[in-house]
Amino acid sequence: MSDGVDRGSAFGRWLTADRAAVDALLAGALARGGDRDAVRAAVVAVAGAFADVEELDPVLGRALVAHVADLAARGRWRADGPDRAVVLDVLPRLTGLVRSQPTATVGAVAAAARTVARTGDLALFGSLLAAVPAVEDPSVVRSTVLVAAWRSGAARYRTAALREAAALPAPVAVAALGLPPGTDPAATLARHAGDPWWWPGYRTEPGVLRRIGGFRGFGGPWLGRPRVVAGGPTGCAVTADGVRWAIVADVHGSAVTRLADEDSVPPTATMSASLPVPWADTVTGVVPASVGSSVLVVSRRHSYHVDAVRPAA
């Protein structure tokens, strides 16, 4: 099963030395219906991704082989899939986390891969985690990955991420949040909690800040054109396709979650605002992005998206 792995590499040396444990992991994947060639290809690929490691921690080696063999057995080790990408492109860069907490890191990062790839930026996710230093407590890993996922665009994690980030050691929080070294993360988080559209270095001028949703045929959530209404847990919702959808959006990303049938939808909020936008269309709804926010979410007659807009003063 190790054919194709460089026996002189750190991974190859570990593979030979830990043969009994490796064989048990691979046999388990085959017993679950895994294709032998697919499992072998996954192991060879991960060995190549960690080829530059001088010495491979056996705990890390077992975690990696167990994970990729399981992915291959379930048909999820695909060339264009986020599960494979996170193993080959993200995990090898996480020297601080991988060396200090290998098992927890492989598990937490792999678990977040699909959500981040679907709603955020997997490359940014990897860059943020690559800057995180070693941690002593494995429970810190999950919190760190959650914060980095939100910071990379997984907006549905916002509330939990803000809570977890506040409890992280300052150097870990700074790295996971992508802040400059020496920044006080508490001050940044407090200001952002009060204004979801503020972040250090982010634009403050009026205009369209983010496009949300889209036609389902192109990867969006809706078949019909959406209309913004008041409602949902953030105070901002959309009606489309006969149901209501909650909008969660901030400076880092957005998420759309189905709520309920459209029977009890409140009237569309009407607001007077100067909207500095690059389109000419009929506005069908305007609602604050969240309770008390100056940023507005706007729907239009001819658009399958809704837009988060900072109005002119």
Image (spheres, helix red, strand yellow):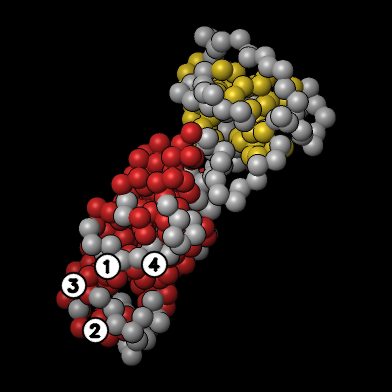
Q: Quadrant of the C terminus?
A: top right
Report how far apart the C-alphas of labels 1 and 3 lie in the structure: 21 Å
Crowdedness of circle 3 by 10 Å Cα count: few (<14), some, many (20+)? some
Q: Which mark is residue 94?
A: 4
Residue identifier under label 3:
21
Residue in view at x 67 percent, y 26 percent: 298
Crowd around label 1: few <14 · some 14–19 · many ≥20 (10 Å):
some
* SS of the residue under disc 2: helix
* Number of other residues with Cα within 10 Å of mark 4, as a class: few under 14, some 14 to 19, many 20 or more: many
The kind of residue tagged 1 is Ser
Q: Which residue is mark 2?
A: 16
Q: Position of residue 247 (x, y in %)?
A: 53, 29
Query: With 299 as the anchor, is 148 left or right in this view?
Result: left
Locate residue 139, reporting x and y percent: 24, 53
Q: Which residue is mark 1?
A: 100
Label 3, label 4: how far apart the Cα atoms are: 24 Å
The residue shown at (35%, 55%) is: 170
